[in-house]
Amino acid sequence: MNGAHDLGGMHGFGRVEPEPDEPVFHADWEKRAFALTLAMALPGQWNIDMSRFARENRPPGEYLSMSYYQIWFAALERMLKERGLVSDEEIAAGHSLYPPKPVARILSPADVAKVLYRGGPTEREPRTTPAFKPGDRVRAKVMNPPTHTRLPRYARGRVGIVARVIGFHVFPDSNAIGAGEDPQWLYAVRFDGRELWGPQGDPRSSVSIDAWEPYLEPA
């Protein structure tokens, strides 16, 4: 979707100011927001793409006024409410007010390390052959899907070179809306900086993005 989260190449937001020695978390509540989001994916039965879509699918004014983990926590609230696992009254109270809903799975403390180590692999057994190979010139399609996509706006309509065939991976655009994994070939595509940013772009720069096959067409 075209939302406030897709900031690449946009003007008016000032310089990126790195924070020296920036900690992973700036406050304890950020740790809890991160941990709860991961842990609740088991009983909530959402996947990583659904979680990303819940974070980016917010009004621009709201998204841009919130910190990183405020967005994570707001997305967690949304996903819990959509699945009937929590109510507005319970969120306001800060604790359960009703008997817990039955869920298929829970994450026990003893399983945390194992689950984090295993992660959620997205590579699947290929069912087709890749349409492109390293060295091919491809154009990122001009597309404006209303739901989640991993193709940034700044690359749409631009020509790049396939640098690598990564593999056959879950397609986030369908996975985010519960329409199935629909695995597709995934490529690393390298774009020249001037192709992306115009004549004023640094001629020494390039940007590589991971692009699924439905995002691409021959150039």
Image (cartoon, helix red, strand yellow):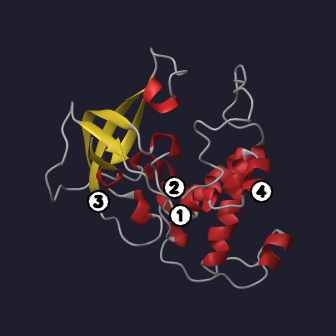
The x and y percentages for residue 214 are: 32, 55
Write down the residue under mark 2.
Answer: 110
Which mark is first along the chain, 2 or 3?
Answer: 2
**Residue 86 versus residue 10 in the image, above or below:** below
**Nearer the camera: disc 1 or disc 2:** 1
**Quadrant of the frame with the C terminus:** top left
Write down the residue under mark 3.
Answer: 183
**Residue 137 versus residue 21 in the image, above or below:** below
- Secondary structure beneath label 1: helix
Write down the residue under mark 4.
Answer: 62
Q: Is residue 108 visible in the rendered structure shown here? A: no
Q: CA distance from mark 2 to mark 4?
A: 37 Å
- Secondary structure beneath label 4: helix
- Secondary structure beneath label 3: loop
Q: Residue pushed farthest front? A: 199
Q: CA distance from mark 3 to mark 2?
A: 32 Å
